[in-house]
């Protein structure tokens, strides 16, 4: 079995693949101090509930935007899965040309999303990933990564508003019934929710105008479902985009390795 690990700034998603199908999937808060042994205990219990065990895992692929966590996940794979993990980087994703000024700066999550989106929806694309940050990533007609836009995430903005204004409470994110709030909480919810909908719509319109070609817009991330039904700017909501991208990358890497082995055997 393949285990796919996506480590985000706020949450980490771990999925088990049996063949090409997701057998189980879990989400946990990201921690830079949790050790490989602690992850193994947590994971073994969840896998047991799903009918699997750590010994079933033969392959591991990791995408992380939190460098401090990579050490622990590498150790988890080496110690408990008995395999060397494949760690996504800017220069080891088959089939993706990174067409930005400084390719080493692109986050692994953005490349994984590009692969997952292109595999499912073709290109060109705008991938809107709503998490700690709100990313707008551009995927070319051939699957190349062509840059994008990074804005603060909705939770980050809400936290900053609460922290900076003494009289503004901490509120939950939800779609308000109307735009004009008639109390403080209603006004804050309208400002945050509809403000982000407008940000998404405005940036998508500007990106499309600058790109100059029809583009499909795919939304993913832990908060993306909030916007479903609130805007016509998003064509597809795809919650499993990142995990599917990790699986697709591993398939490409394995296919390349098999091709190299076949070439050596026939030469």
Image (cartoon, rainbow, N blue to C red):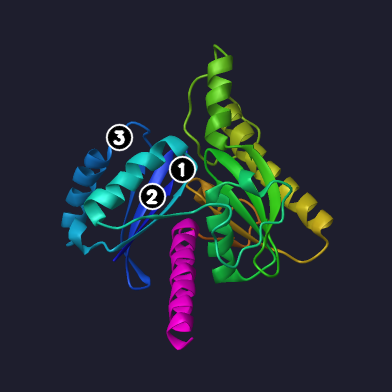
Q: How crowded is mark 1: few (under 14 residues within 10 Å), some or many (20 or more)?
A: many
Q: Main secondary structure of the magenta part?
A: helix
- Tell me the element at label 1: loop
Residue 210 seen in the figure = yes
Q: Does the magenta stretch include residue 248?
A: yes
The residue to which callout 1 is attached is 8
Query: Is the residue under label 3 in contact with that under label 1 (CB below 8 Å)?
Result: no
Identify the residue at horizontal 17%, vertical 49% (top origin): 45
Residue labelled with disc 2: 13
Residue 27, position in %: x, y?
A: 35, 47
Residue 24: which numbered mark, if any?
none
Q: Which residue is drawn at 80% across and 65% down?
A: 213
**How far from the left and from the top, in percent, is residue 145?**
66, 58
Q: What element carries label 3?
A: loop
The CA span between labels 2 and 1 is: 8 Å
Q: Residues within 10 Å of mark 2 (few under 14, many from 20)?
A: some
User: What range of the chain is rendered magenta?
Assistant: 240-267
The earlier-in-sequence mark between 3 and 2 is 2
């Amino acid at each position: 079995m393949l285990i796919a690990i996506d480590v985000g700034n706020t949450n980490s998603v771990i999925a088990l693949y049996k063949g090409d199908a997701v057998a189980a999937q879990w989400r946990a808060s990201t921690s830079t101090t949790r050790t490989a042994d602690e992850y193994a205990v947590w994971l073994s219990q969840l896998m047991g509930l799903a009918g699997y065990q750590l010994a079933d895992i033969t392959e591991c692929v990791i995408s992380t935007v939190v460098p401090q966590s990579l050490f622990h996940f590498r150790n988890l794979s080496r110690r408990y899965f008995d395999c060397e993990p494949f760690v996504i980087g800017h220069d080891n994703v088959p089939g993706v040309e990174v067409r930005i000024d400084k390719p080493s700066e692109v986050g692994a999550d953005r490349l994984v999303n590009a692969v997952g989106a292109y595999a499912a929806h073709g290109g060109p694309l705008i991938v809107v990933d709503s998490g700690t940050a709100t990313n707008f990533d551009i995927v070319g007609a051939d699957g190349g990564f062509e840059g994008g836009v990074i804005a603060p995430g909705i939770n980050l903005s809400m936290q900053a508003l609460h922290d900076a204004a003494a009289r503004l409470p901490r509120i939950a994110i939800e779609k308000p019934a109307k735009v004009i709030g008639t109390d403080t909480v209603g006004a804050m919810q309208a400002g945050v929710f509809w403000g982000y909908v407008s940000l998404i719509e405005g940036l998508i319109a500007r990106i499309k105008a600058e790109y100059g070609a029809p583009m499909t817009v795919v939304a993913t991330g832990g908060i993306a479902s909030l916007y479903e039904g609130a805007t016509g700017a998003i064509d597809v909501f795809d919650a499993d985009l990142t995990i599917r991208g990790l699986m697709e990358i591993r398939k490409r890497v394995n296919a390349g390795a098999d091709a190299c082995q076949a070439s050596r055997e026939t030469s």
